[in-house]
Amino acid sequence: MTVLDDHANASASRAQSSTGAIELRGISKFYGDTAAVNDLSLDIAAGEFISLLGPSGCGKTTTLRMIAGFEHPDAGDIFISGQSVLGQPPYRRNVNTVFQAYALFPHMSIAENVAYGLQQKRTPKAEIRERVAEALDMVQMRRFADRKPTQLSGGQQQRIALARALVNRPAVLLLDEPLGALDRQLREEMQLELKLLQSRLGITFVFVTHDQGEALSMSDRIAIMRDGHIEQLADADTIYAAPATAYVAGFVGQQNFLTGTIVGDEPGATLLRSAHGLIRAAKIASGTPRLRVGAAAQAAVRPEFVQISARTGGAHAASTGADVGGADGSNRVAGTLIGVSHLGETMQYLVQLGGGNGTDTQSLLVRRPTPEAPRLAIGDDVWCSWSPDSVILFAADELPDSAHVEPPTLSPVLATPAPATPAPATPLEDHS
Amino acid sequence: MASPSAPRRLPAPLLAFPAWAWLLFFFVAPVGMVLWFSFGYKPGIFGTHANDVLSFDRYIEALSPTFFATFVNTLWVGLAGTALCLVIGGPVAYWMAVKAPMNRRGLLLALVMVPFWTNFLVRTIGWQVILAPEGWLSTLLQAVGLQEGPLELLYTRTAVLIGVVYNYLPLMILPLFVAFDRVGGSLREASKDLGANRIRTFTQVTVPLAQPGIVAGVLLVFIPLMGDYITATVLGGAKGNMIGQLVASQFQTAQNWALGSAMAVLLILVIALTVAAGALLLWLLTWPARSRRRLVLGDAS
């Protein structure tokens, strides 16, 4: 399903004429019988920073390659700056690409690499010198001008690839996972630089990535792709806070999913009966049709919205203030702490829920800011609770592994020994 | 071992020892002997060589008009054959490395190698059958009316050219395939993305990057082709179209090792000089393009 938000609708009319606007109109691309891109429509405003986000094989790179001209759609039409580019070879399009592996010409110096595009347009040599120097200054690589690409590090090559594309002053810059090969620190630095550069130059950026952090931090809008179509198109806030589908919810950020059946529909809240307790949700996802009582559904709550407290005696710890569950016992589940990991600014807890008899065992991820994180030991009995506002209900949907990986649980064999012996802490990685 | 912490190792250059030894005994030494014999003379009817009097007389003898004509002939066949191999093999190698479906490339490479499964001499004699005036090619050409009378191709320079192109083509295709294959699709895409059309992408990215392979292919074909005498004997007749035949006849028939050696040394010199001249010519021809592309910014900022 393609969800066009207001921003896109507003910019649609502008996209017809302005330089740098892109319109993808129902494009499809098939490889044999499989559709890499399936009837995809997308309007990108001039000067916009848009990310195509999705797991590998979702069609994001194919979409980018069709805009660049390396692939041609089997159906549909592509407009760049208001002109159809159907059948136009890449060298005629006012579009430049930053390739995943940079693709710098090894037989040319850095300066010659950057000058390549200008030479193709038969730019006078004096102007080439000037613009190449300018482009290299822009990415702070001027002093490497006369070296060969193989003498540079990955991050430096990345900057050169960027300069080589931008020196041509394209209407649109396409970036195919350009930061994928860089280490984390460099990647974060480049994210900031890219965003600054984009707002300074006003060029349309189409950024392909599988890294949700990259997409969230840089983009004006994000198109979440799944199986060749756009699942949701919105800005980062909306994608994060109001995912249209369970797929988007699972793909962006961490998510706890609890499946169950709808048991009640009150004003302002929907009730879901799960194996681990009653869940009261204030919101139903925009991509989910009305949920009737008796329908299968899943509730999603992000780890950072879950409160955790020690479970002592039989009563729940409503008085401690660390419990935001409802008075009727909804949005509160009992579990056993099976893992704690320090993520820096947050602490992450892995809580195993229910399933005393081994059935319906599920783990819940909880994240608390480190300063206010409760001191809990592995093996402790805990309460986890959350407010109805932080729960979103989705229609039941099979989620591919690429979108969401269930947090691990202890196997019954491991769980049987007395809880007094601390279970081995499961190393938890940020698998997003 | 005396000390386990510092295991004694043989020096790494020893890895190349078998190759060095082999080349020294079976290449450097024989070439040295040939060079030595070339300064000698044939002592009498039954002697093959003598070196008690050293002179350049054999070289003067070798540069006689007959030998010189053969020289020109050899050079012509060598250059034309290499050029034809490049013109025929280049597109095939490019297609195999760039355009052909990925899963078929192994099969295509194997097909290029198929002629090598048959003996060199047998394959060349096969061409003798094809090109003969009463052969099927002649009959066919006459039948379709492209040729009047029997085909008079066998035992000519053209027949030799056809034979050497056939025999040496795989040696051109294989290095070219590797060279084009190594350029990689993303660099060609980057070139097109930056505004270069197919032809400019080919001349400015593909060929410069494939250059080592192209040079290897040209040398791999040109050098053995210049010394070839089997193809020339089978298809060119006993007239002695190529130097290789003259050298062989001096050693085998005339038993004049001194003159044969001088001819062999001259052949080596001609090959070396031709390669050097070719390299210089290429360098000069590409100079304008290189200077146009050259861009040195220097350190000033």
Image (spheres, helix red, strand yellow):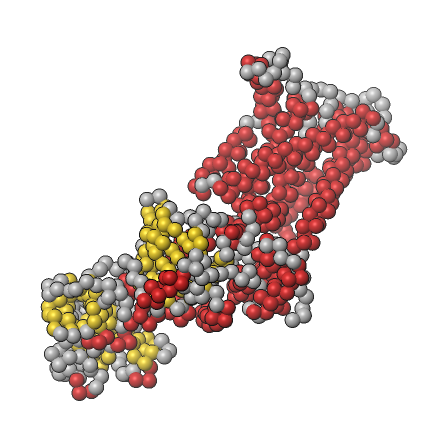
Give coordinates of residue A407: x percent, y percent: 27, 67
Give coordinates of residue B210: x percent, y percent: 59, 46
In-front residue for pair B43/A334: A334
State the residue at coordinates (73%, 45%): B280
Query: Which quadrant holds residue A151?
Result: bottom right
Please indicate whether residue B88 sits to the left or right of residue A96 in the image: right
Q: Is residue A1 above or below residue B74?
A: below
State the residue at coordinates (23%, 58%): A398
Q: Is residue B254 above or below residue B35?
A: above
In-front residue for pair A337/A100: A100
Give coordinates of residue B259: x percent, y percent: 81, 29
In-front residue for pair A59/A2: A2
Please indicate whether residue B184 sits to the left or right of residue A320 in the image: right
Residue A14 visible at all: yes
Query: Which quadrant holds residue A421?
Result: bottom left
State the residue at coordinates (49%, 54%): A93
Residue B8 visible at all: no
Please indicate whether residue A293 sits to the left or right of residue A38 in the image: left
In the rendered image, the quadrant that contains the C terminus of chain A is bottom left
In-front residue for pair A406/A209: A209
Q: Is residue B281 above or below residue A383?
A: above
Q: Residue furthest bottom?
A: A319
State the residue at coordinates (55%, 68%): A139
In the rendered image, the quadrant that contains the N terminus of chain A is bottom left
Query: Which quadrant holds residue B297?
Result: bottom right
Give coordinates of residue A348: x percent, y percent: 30, 75
The count of marks equals: 0
